[in-house]
Image (tube, rainbow, N blue to C red):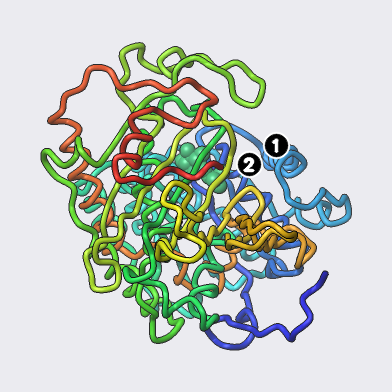
């Protein structure tokens, strides 16, 4: 059923999406997986939806030798396999001639002179105004040579240096600890102004994640109860069915804490816990989120063992397919201590959240792909319908489902019809697809469009990246001090290790079943 009341536009300008000027998007890592699976399909969907500025161009840059034609064929396959909307031949025929490829080594200064010439030629050919977006989908060790190469070739210019813009998108990982994140920020900050840097966290482009602020601040019923007086605890879960897949070399160095918690999960936590910002201005919103990171109680020393759990998947099966244990996956060291699962209990030490635990968990090779934020409210008094201590009424839970079916549900207790005095928990359920009837845009569509319009609200600011790394680095140091030679295991396809169950059950609570 379509929504019945009028829709209200909430873009920061309070109008519609600002006009998007034609631009040239240069993807470093152009022959890689991200470009093929997510970026080009996202651009193609923007084109189908009439949102990609006409005449824009994309240049993939990678070490692999490829012609423009070969690049177009590869990304076409990527669109067929991964696009939200099916490939339409006539649209593709329009789009393909705007895709180009340049092979070159990021470390070679010559690459930038060649890139400069190619960009100039394409911009002339397509009559583009010279707006450039550089997408760094490459390992962080290449960020410095790329930024410096761009600066030397005159491709990166500061705002106000010319009428058109230069912007840079930085893919994760932005570092592997606080010191390396600071080093990356320094390198990018030498060449680009903070207003030109878009540090991407694709979770911030997901529909339900964007909806979090709307749920909290466009409804009057939630704010009065959104605090320690009414909320018992919050659970944030990002569960993945897939194992490490083909990303062994990256994942071995990262692990679940760096890969998922430092960025995606902490950003979700910020959106749940932040104070109402006074406007939707990007920096006002980001200041409000930053406050949460400042209030996150550091987990250090002995506490690390008490309130964090890390584990690896062992042999098992997910979604009907056998999974070797993590340490038997291709490219993984047989004695690896990289965690594929992490659970953390933490606190936001401020007035609103005093004493409310936030339980965070994420893992690979779990039974399903399912992510949600669940806000569990306090128990009702033990009288009336809750008088029997042996059978307490289930608490109210507001669950915001991020994936796979985006939506939200509220669990309430209801009377069972009939003559017996029975109660039963029921779910009031809202699913995006039922109400709005079409699949939501992919996160990368939203975020690429944001960069083109210069809206940084859904991107990580430098101080936030460093604050989350500061918090994560203390946990990493605690783990290092523990010096474990093996990690607890959970069978692939099960819900995680027994240690994680104990973490929450020791507090008289339980993980939600996903
Ligand atoms: C990425 C991580 O940032 O997010 C991956 O590097 C993870 O390990 C992915 O699989 C999950 O994203 P999504 O959108 O599939 O939930």
Q: Measured along the vertical axis of the image, is residue 330 above or below residue 422?
A: above
Q: Residue at x 32, y 74 (%)?
A: 287
Measured from the top left, where is residue 406 in percent x and y?
Answer: 64, 56
Q: Which mark is residue 36?
A: 2
Whether pointer 2 and pointer 1 mark residues with C-beta atoms closer than 8 Å, the reply is yes
User: Few, some or many C-alpha atoms within 10 Å of disc 2 (few <14, some 14-19, many ≥20)?
Assistant: many
Q: Measured along the vertical axis of the image, is residue 404 above or below residue 188?
A: above
Query: Between disc 2 and disc 1, whose residue precedes?
Result: 2
The image quadrant of residue 193 is bottom left
Q: Is residue 29 left or right of residue 354?
A: right
Front position among marks 2 and 1: 2
Measured from the top left, where is residue 64 in percent x and y?
Answer: 55, 31
Q: Measured along the vertical axis of the image, is residue 73 above or below residue 219?
A: above
The answer to whether residue 227 is visible is: yes
Q: Which residue is mark 1?
A: 74
What SS does tag 1 mark?
A: helix
Q: Residue at x 36, y 33 (%)?
A: 255
């Amino acid at each position: 059923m379509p929504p019945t009341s009028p829709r209200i536009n909430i873009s920061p300008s309070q109008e519609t999406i600002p006009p998007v000027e034609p631009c040239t998007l240069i993807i470093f890592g152009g022959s890689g997986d991200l470009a093929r699976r997510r970026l080009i399909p996202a651009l193609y969907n923007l084109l189908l939806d009439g949102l990609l500025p006409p005449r824009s161009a994309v240049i993939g840059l990678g070490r692999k030798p490829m012609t423009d034609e070969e690049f177009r064929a590869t990304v076409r396959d990527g669109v067929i396999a991964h696009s939200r909307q099916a490939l339409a031949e006539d649209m593709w025929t329009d789009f393909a001639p705007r895709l180009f490829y340049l092979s070159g080594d990021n470390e070679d200064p010559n690459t930038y002179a060649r890139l400069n010439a190619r960009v100039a030629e394409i911009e002339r050919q397509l009559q583009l105004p010279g707006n450039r977006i550089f997408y760094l989908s490459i390992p962080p060790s290449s960020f410095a040579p790329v930024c410096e190469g761009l600066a030397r070739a005159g491709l990166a210019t500061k705002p106000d240096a010319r009428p058109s813009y230069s912007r840079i998108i930085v893919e994760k990982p932005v570092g592997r600890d606080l010191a390396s994140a600071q080093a990356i920020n320094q390198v990018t900050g030498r060449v680009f102004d903070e207003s030109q840097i878009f540090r991407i966290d694709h979770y911030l482009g997901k529909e339900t994640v964007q909806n979090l602020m709307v749920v909290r601040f466009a409804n009057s019923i939630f704010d009065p109860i959104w605090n320690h007086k009414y909320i018992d605890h919050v659970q944030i879960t990002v569960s993945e069915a897939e194992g490490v897949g083909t990303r062994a070399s990256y994942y071995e160095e990262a692990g679940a804490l760096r890969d998922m918690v430092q960025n995606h999960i902490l950003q979700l936590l910020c959106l749940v816990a932040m104070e109402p910002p006074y406007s939707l201005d990007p920096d006002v919103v980001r200041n409000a989120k930053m406050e949460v990171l400042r209030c996150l109680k550091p987990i250090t020393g002995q506490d690390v063992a008490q309130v964090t759990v890390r584990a690896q998947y062992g042999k098992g099966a997910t979604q009907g397919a056998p999974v070797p244990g993590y340490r038997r996956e291709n490219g993984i060291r047989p004695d690896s201590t990289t965690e594929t699962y992490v659970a953390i209990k933490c606190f936001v030490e401020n007035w609103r959240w005093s004493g409310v635990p936030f339980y965070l968990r994420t893992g690979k090779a779990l039974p399903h792909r399912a992510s949600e934020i669940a806000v569990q409210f306090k128990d009702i008094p033990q009288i009336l319908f809750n008088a029997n201590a042996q059978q307490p009424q289930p608490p109210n839970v507001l669950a915001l489902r991020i994936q796979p079916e985006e939506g939200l549900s509220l669990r309430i207790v209801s009377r069972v019809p009939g003559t017996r005095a029975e109660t039963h928990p029921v779910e009031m359920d809202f699913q995006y697809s039922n109400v709005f009837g079409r699949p939501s845009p992919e996160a990368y569509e939203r975020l690429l469009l944001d960069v083109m319009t210069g809206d940084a609200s859904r991107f990580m600011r430098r101080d936030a990246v460093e604050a989350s790394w500061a918090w994560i680095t203390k946990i990493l140091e605690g783990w290092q001090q523990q010096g474990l030679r093996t990690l607890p295991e959970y069978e692939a396809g099960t819900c995680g290790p027994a240690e994680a169950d104990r973490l929450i059950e020791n507090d008289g609570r339980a993980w939600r079943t996903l």
